[in-house]
Amino acid sequence: MAFPFTPPQQISLAIYGGPAIRYPVNNIYCVARNYADHAIEMGHDPEREAPFFFMKPANALSGPGDNFIYPDFSEDVHHEVEMVVGLQSGGRNLSEEEALACIYGYGVGLDMTARDRQAELKKAGRPWELAKGFSGAAVCSAISPLELCDSNPDATDISLSINGELRQQGNTAQMIWKTAELISTLSRYFPLEAGDLIYTGTPAGVGPVKPGDHLVCTLEGIAAIELDVV
Ligand code: MN
């Protein structure tokens, strides 16, 4: 195939147990307010409002070994630690059973959020991209293929520590929409594809980061990532 210019390089993540191969990243989907305790801390009633989706551009991805570069347009960037699902196949209008067959593996990441900008956008009724899709805003660990996951991804502890202090702790069993339901629901709106990442929402305890912080994210038995804020 010929192109009028060189296409951008494929964005990818490391794979646990596979040093010679990498996980090719396609689209990045995210779900908001998928843990009741986080919806409540943000001032919403999870009994009345269902979770919902948004996206990040794939080139917002930041992988193992990358620092988080604090953006100059925000003074209140928050961490949101989340389980990340990586697909190996996709489709449209998938049943929950078909959705599960699309999963390649799992990682742990951060939906970094410029909370001050997001508050302005929410107030104005505008999309969230400027607050959620900036460069480096999609932090993700190496992807653990299903066969290397030592815990059940639907019921494992997820946590974030900053400078050795525990800030967020939850369990993926607390997710309002479970992984299969997330994939199935997304596939009604988007043609899901191999390489798509899905950020599954954050438990309570979100808060600000600052330059100099050292962040450690853990999805027990499955994946971990650490990074510095610079
Ligand atoms: Mn989030």
Image (spheres, grey):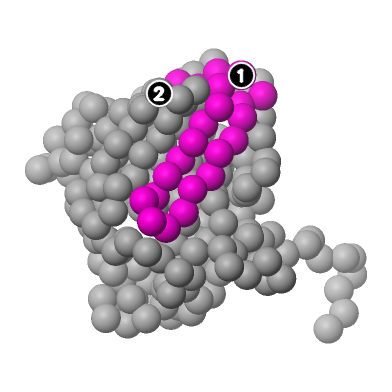
Q: Name the mark on residue 212.
A: 1
**Callout 2, which amino acid?**
Glu
- In the image, 135 versus 122, the foreground residue is 135
Give yes or no for residue 199 being in the magenta stretch: no
Q: Which residue appears at 44% of the width and 62% of the height? A: 106
Q: Position of residue 169 (x, y in %)?
A: 30, 36
Callout 2: CB less than 8 Å from ligand 1: no
Which of the 4 image quadrants contains residue 8? bottom right
Q: Nearer the viewer, mark 2 or mark 1?
A: 2
Q: Quadrant of the C terminus?
A: top right
Q: Position of residue 212 (x, y in %)?
A: 61, 19
Q: Which residues are magenta?
A: 208-230
Q: Which residue appears at 87% of the width and 79% of the height? A: 2
Q: Name the mark on residue 165.
A: 2
Q: Quadrant of the N terminus?
A: bottom right
- In the image, 136 versus 167, the foreground residue is 167
Which of the 4 image quadrants contains residue 166? top left
Horizontal placement of 128 versus 50: left or right?
Answer: right
Q: In terms of secondary structure, where does tag 2 sit? A: strand
Give yes or no for residue 215 being in the magenta stretch: yes
- In the image, 18 versus 171, the foreground residue is 18
Callout 1: CB less than 8 Å from ligand 1: no
Farthest top residue in view: 75
Q: CA distance from mark 2 to mark 1?
A: 14 Å
**Callout 1, which amino acid?**
Gly
Q: Which residue appears at 63% of the width and 60% of the height? A: 14
Residue 69 visible to the viewer: yes
Depicted 190 relative to depicted 208: above or below: below
Depicted 224 relative to depicted 104: above or below: above
Q: Which residue appears at 50% of the width and 76% of the height? A: 88
Q: Position of residue 118 (x, y in %)?
A: 44, 29
Depicted 216 relative to depicted 95: above or below: above
